[in-house]
Amino acid sequence: MKVSEVNVHLVKPRDGLVAFASVVLDNRIYLGAIGVHQKLDGSGYRLTYPTRKSGDRSFHIFHPIEKEISHEIERAIFDKLTTLINCHNSAQHLEGGGHAIE
């Protein structure tokens, strides 16, 4: 399965959430509102997929079923996230700023 059109939007970090992402699979289906969270131990990132609450229950909107496609989506999003963070940190270093992108 081909993962393309990877978009990552950094947000002001809150409760581990650092970004939202979207991808296109096989040029056929758009998946958006994927949360990117920093792992509690700081060792990297994890993805969360959208859910809806109805009463006291939560229902998954979508999520990968196969590990292989899950890893492909993670790899694509994490690569884009790393590039964005590196660019953002370089810009902060040059400007002397320290603000999160909102």
Image (spheres, rainbow, N blue to C red):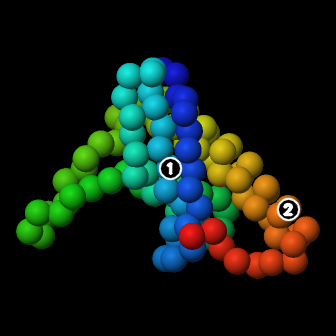
Q: Horizontal placement of 67 versus 6: left or right?
A: left
Q: Horizontal placement of 44 versus 51: left or right?
A: right
Q: Which amino acid does label 2 sit on?
A: Ser
Q: Compute the Cα span from label 2 to label 1.
A: 21 Å
Residue 21: assigned label? 1
At a point 11% along the width and 63% down the height, the residue shown is 54
| Quadrant of the image occupied by residue 48 | bottom left
Tell me where residue 67 appears, x and y as whole percent.
45, 34
**Residues packed near mark 1 inside 10 Å, few (<14), some (14 to 19) or many (20 plus):** many
Q: How many labels does the image show?
A: 2
When the figure is inspected, residue 36 is found, relative to residue 77, above or below; the finding is below
| Quadrant of the image occupied by residue 18 | bottom right
| Quadrant of the image occupied by residue 55 | bottom left
Tell me where residue 87 appears, x and y as whole percent.
79, 55
Tell me where residue 92 appears, x and y as whole percent.
82, 70
Residue found at the far front of this picture: 95
At a point 76% along the width and 61% down the height, the residue shown is 88
Picture quarter with the C terminus: bottom right
In the image, 71 versus 79, the foreground residue is: 79
Q: Where does label 2 land, which residue?
A: 90
- The reply to whether residue 39 is visible in this rendering is no
